[in-house]
Image (cartoon, coloured by chain):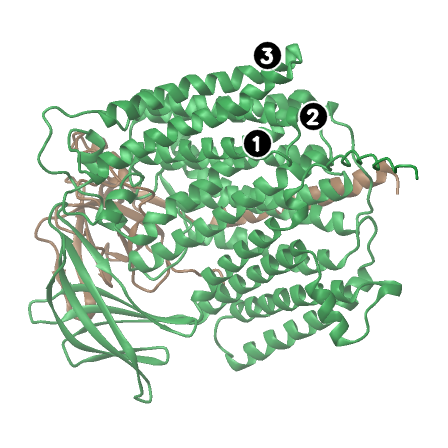
Amino acid sequence: MIVETGHFALALALAISLVQMVMPIWAARTGDPALRQTASQAALGAFACVLFAFAALTWAHVTSDFSVQNVVENSHTQKPLIYKISGVWGNHEGSMLLWVLILTLFGACVAVAKNSVPPRLRASTLGVQGLITFVFLLFIITTSNPFSRVIPAPVEGNDLNPLLQDVGLAIHPPLLYVGYVGFSISFAFAVAALIDGRIDAVWARAVRPWTLTAWCFLTLGIAMGSYWAYYELGWGGWWFWDPVENASLMPWIAGTALLHSTVVMEKRDALKVWTVLLAILTFSLSLIGTFLVRSGVITSVHSFATDPTRGVFILAILVLFIGGSLTLFAWRAPLLRQGGLFAPISREGSLVLNNLFLVAACATVLVGTLYPLLLEMLTGEKITVGPPFFNSTFVPLAIPLLLIVPFGQALAWKRGDVLAAAQRLFAALAVALVVGFAVLALTWGGPVMAPVGIGLGAYLLIGSALEVVSRARGYGASRARSLGQIGRRAVGLPRSAWGTALAHAGVGVVVLGIAAQGWATEGLATLKPGQSLATGPYVATLDSVGPRQGPNYEEAAASLTIRTRSGDEVGHVDTGKRFYPSRKMAVTESGLLTIGASQVYASLGEMSQDGGVGLRLYYKPLVLLIWLGAVVMAVGGGLSLTDRRMRVGVPAKAKARPLPAAVPAE
Amino acid sequence: MTRKKRRLILIAACGSVLALALGLILYAMSGSIVFFRSPSDIAQQGIAPGTRLRLGGLVKDGSVKRGPDQIVDFAVTDTNATVEVQYKGLLPDLFREGQGVVTEGVLEPGGRFRADTVLAKHDESYMPREVADALKAQGRWQEGGSNKGGAAPKPATASADGTLGPRSER
């Protein structure tokens, strides 16, 4: 019964989203504010309905209701509760439902964000959101219904893919989707602005918190996915330049550009048309990502959900939204009033350059992801564009981009002074060069790019610190002299200033982590108990290897002791190969030993007849910095979000001052 | 600064960054694209030894021989032609005889394929799409066995020298 009610709620949400889409248009024609208000109510209603549908599906999964097709295919009575819940979005139908749930959640948030969005903009935005909700609900109901029944119901389900039975994958999709889908708000704002033909700093202020929220979640989602791939897949890498990864990276890059161009728009009323275009492109890339992952067109070795009907439907969605919004852009953008002027060498100028490099980097990723598909379609030739392609296109574009980051921060708005900025950054530049050369000298004969990366990371970190210091010190007459004064003023800086510095420092931390992988080492051997394998500064000794029984798997488990080369014991690592009988599938469980920010990483191979076991051992120096840096970036974004200026987007009208009470005459 | 001059500078900046991106793409395209070949393609086309390529097909039944130091010899077949493959490293969990597999590496002068990467997917009913297409071209493959996965399964990868790891900073 609950399942049918959930199905009905989904259909109801479809109808409500139609109302949400039509009402603002009608209201715009009649100019009726009450009618306009219905868009907000519809958005809340649609959210409530989808939430109920999602809860119903979750209920079916938790109670192992095997009369539901989706539960049969992805669940199992013996599965731990947390994976019964995460199994809801561990499949195509459920993940699309989660997608729409988050979409309507954002709609509901816009509906209740009373003082940050002007009423007319809110109504139009919700209208556009209503259209997106409608189309995706239609997609779910017609091609990917999660509530289909199976009659007769089987006794047991197929279980969730064991690879997905992991805490990382329980939280990874929701994080990623909040990011992906959050950009729909920026998109809806942009389309609404184009329809209204009006865009200004108020628009930029209204859209910025939503973009920033989406960006923070996408950052965390990508980092989470990367870390999951790293520890779960047992291959020791953290980024594969795989189409599925690129699908999430592209909206992130475009979203980063959008975030920076909105700042220019808010502060200086410039780059309006460009910002609108970026908002459209960012969400378009989210949609392309959904298409790549969900339609089965990917040539990659792990394409799934190969269903042509879905592919064609999602392609139609792409054409509708990307084609439609770009047409609207071409038609309406010339009407938008031009913004303020600025000199090429200024904060704005550096942000334009940042946008250029980001967009160029994004374009190379897009070409690398789509070119193989296109070539196969046109010539039938199958090619792979792997990490070498991306490394030789993305990295050369990323380096100048990173060099600009502290530099742009040091330039003044409107008209900057390169020399003054260089002087302020002198310390960062000097330290970066010294660090880079010192590392190069210490590791002479090793990788060349790694010291460059370390120098760059140091430059970004010190640059961010200097930015906070110089802002706290102040300029001109109000310049603070003593250290105490600077400290007090630093504490008093707006949170967004700290947020920016933190986010940029996070980039520096990521760069350090990536660069350090240049010194990663690996060893491979067949070991019997008692034998050792060395890599980097560590030696692993195999203590024991044998079978073990898990809740829904059998495992060949190995236990290793890790020592330094001089023989001091550092710790133990357990690694194994699990076999899941319900899926007849083997999964390697990598073993990790964290030493500071570095890790020793072990993964197990086949057992041989004579009792030996294949072991691969990696030493990953400072590898945790990669994900830690991403977290720092997201925290920086979150800190900016708590800034008062973010919450109060619309300059509130001064409250009518109460008339002074009449003073009784004496 | 006039609007016209500002626009010129902006266009020049855009042009140079885009030209840089285009140049990098073309340069990378010329050097780092790997073509997919089936064993029949290799038998028929006379591919120059040393060319990096992806070889895909079925792991021939009874061909897997494990040597010392994690060296594995096996044969990849599309039922018309067969190529001997040597690989050093841990094999992915789903590597099995009779299963579809994609390997990446170079062809040696003797005709043996030295793989540094072996890919297989984490799904029991999985057949790499390239392999399925190649087998279809040979008329040896019927549709069947759907793929159901969860959110973005990644490739199960094994790499002999860590080439699949991050190389950007090396």
Shade of chain B as shown in the rendered figure:
brown
Mark 1: which secondary structure? helix
Along the viewing direction, whichever of A297 and A576 lies nearer the viewer: A576
- For image coordinates 20% across by 35% down, the residue present is A71
Q: CA distance from mark 1 to mark 3?
A: 21 Å
Label annotation for residue A64: none
Give the farthest residue toward the bottom.
A566
Q: Quadrant of the C terminus of chain A?
A: top right
Chain for colour green: A
- The residue that label 2 is drawn on is A333
- The residue that label 1 is drawn on is A187
Mark 1 touching mark 3, by CB under 8 A?
no
Amino acid on which the number 3 mark rests in the picture: Trp
Image coordinates of residue A653 in percent, x first then y, are 76, 34
Q: CA distance from mark 2 to mark 1?
A: 14 Å
Amino acid on which the number 1 mark rests in the picture: Phe
Label annotation for residue A26: 3
Along the viewing direction, whichever of A186 and A287 lies nearer the viewer: A186
B166 is higher (above) or lower (below) than A44: below
- For image coordinates 19% across by 29% down, the residue present is A68
Amino acid on which the number 2 mark rests in the picture: Ala
